[in-house]
Image (cartoon, rainbow, N blue to C red):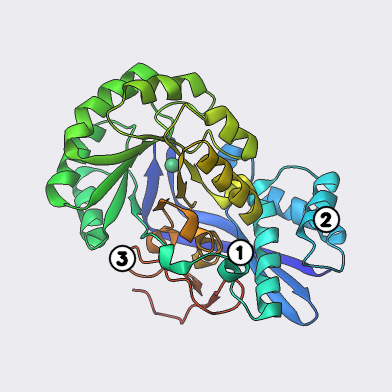
Amino acid sequence: MPVRHEPLELRTIFEFRIARGGKSVQRNTLVRFTHEGIEGLGEAAPSRYYGESPETVAVALDAWAPAIGDDPFALEAIHARCTATLAGHDAAHAALEMALYDWQGKKLGMPVWKMLGLDRAQTPVSCVTLGMAEQAEMLAKLETVKAFPAIKVKLGGPGDVENLRRVRAHYDGRIQVDANAAWDAASAVRVLHEIAPLRIELVEQPVAREDLDGLAFVRARSPIPVFADESCHHLADIARLAGRVDGVNLKLMKTGGIREALRMIHAARAHGMQVMLGSMVESSLALSAAAQLAPLADYLDLDGHWLIADDPFAGAPGEQGGIALSDAPGLGVTPAVAGSRA
Ligand code: MG
């Protein structure tokens, strides 16, 4: 089999908590695709919230392996064969497609962003996410990210507005907030008016993911631009969200890979929507895959490597929100030098 996979366990520096729960260990999957002596790497960050786990990722990769065929450049045909075998499984699909792109770039001696025709000079900086925390822990976390030009604060829990006020008092950079579907539409409007004086750049997913009319209700009344995250997975979601939100947060683990994300970016532009590229708790491998599309985004949230204690890879994400697309072939990812991160 040209496709192998193994567990990739990542430990977060702080427990990563959002409106629907917290965790300090993320169980991802590393994918290795080998062909003609070249190895392409991919990473899946499965989310139970979206129905995936390391176990389902393994099942999907094993099911797809015989359908890859002998031309790793034929992504359209590979996707068609894989989907005919087993549909869905977006995080697994993203990992496989990532490995194929990495392989292609290594074969051609070219970085993926260049294969896609993009201009790395257009890459915005990334924000870093602060998970929910008690006051003392939040201020300790804030100390670690003060040099970042932008942060994303998770809301939707008890005391969240007070917490945000404290963050603003200690941080002068750009602040985005994310409610992770925690509010109803009326509460969202109330909270957004309350926090607007804190200079909030945008709010992600104020209401439940299926509540598209709620998103429209909030957007019509919100003093802060509204972005969809949990409500936005695939191309067809862009059409459903058009006119209801100001922008979308696209993550490879939701779209199923770079190609679908690319289609969604262009569709969102056609509808006058802004684009954020986001991430799950991921190593620099998956983050570097998303970063290949970064020149097309207005906002980046490719910060997962900053949240984990033991990033096994080095790639595009750098220090303090900097995303550097290199000339290294493929995804531009190398094994991390042990002990390079405190
Ligand atoms: Mg979000």
The amino acid beneath tag 1 is Leu
Chain-order first, disc 1 or disc 3: 1
- The residue at the point 26 percent across, 26 percent down is 191
Chain-order first, disc 2 or disc 1: 2
Q: Is residue 46 visible?
A: no
Residue holding disc 2: 77
Q: Which of 186/61 is in front?
A: 186
- The residue at the point 38 percent across, 26 percent down is 219
Snapshot quadrant of residue 180: top left
For the C terminus, the quadrant is bottom left
Judge the density around disc 3: few (<14), some (14-19), many (≥20) Cα neighbours within 10 Å: some
Residue holding disc 3: 320
x then y, percent, for residue 296: 49, 55
The amino acid beneath tag 2 is Ala
Q: Is residue 140 left or right of residue 226?
A: left
For the N terminus, the quadrant is bottom right
- The residue at the point 46 percent across, 38 percent down is 273
Instruction: Name, please, the residue furthest toward the top.
Output: 186
Give the label on residue 116, or none: 1
Snapshot quadrant of residue 47: top right
Q: Is residue 201 visible?
A: yes
x then y, percent, for residue 169: 12, 46
